[in-house]
Amino acid sequence: MEDSDPEQGIPGSEELETVGCAVRVHHAQGESGKVQFIAQGLQRFRITQWLRRRPPYLVEVEYPDEPEEAADELKAYTLAIISSIKELLRTNRFTARK
């Protein structure tokens, strides 16, 4: 039996994807029941086995090998993302300097 709770926003295990990305959360800000944050992707994972299908969920995962990217291309993407994040932080009402 699934223990999903749509009113609380908790999906059932059958609604969750089997591939995801572990993240580090930065600059979490909450207001009026909403949360904004920046998530830094750390590593992709794939669920291999469910150990507990009720919240709090517990799974075994594997970490697939990531394809190698050209260093120059990766650096260009990194710089573009950093620039975009800085612009978002300047315009975001939660982080804008007063």
Image (cartoon, grey):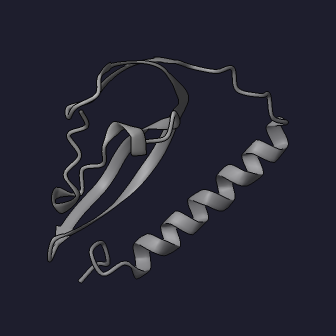
- The residue sitting at 66% across, 50% down in the picture is 78
Residue 61, compared with residue 90, is above or below; it is above
- The residue sitting at 72% across, 53% down in the picture is 77
- The residue sitting at 30% across, 72% down in the picture is 95
Please, which residue is most extreme toward the front here? 1
Residue 91 % position (x, y): 42, 81
Does residue 50 appear to the left or right of 28 in the view shown? Answer: right
Residue 82 % position (x, y): 57, 58
Residue 42 % position (x, y): 50, 34
Residue 33, compared with residue 23, is above or below; it is below
Residue 9, by quadrant, is bottom left
Residue 32, by quadrant, is bottom left
* Image quarter of the C terminus: bottom left
- The residue sitting at 19% across, 51% down in the picture is 5
Residue 48, compared with residue 80, is above or below; it is above
Does residue 5 appear to the left or right of 72 in the view shown? Answer: left
Residue 88 % position (x, y): 47, 73
Along the viewing direction, whichever of 32 and 77 lies nearer the viewer: 32
Does residue 38 appear to the left or right of 7 in the view shown? Answer: right
Number of residue marks:
0
Does residue 55 appear to the left or right of 65 in the view shown? Answer: left
Residue 93, compared with residue 60, is above or below; it is below
* Image quarter of the N terminus: top left
Along the viewing direction, whichever of 14 and 39 lies nearer the viewer: 14
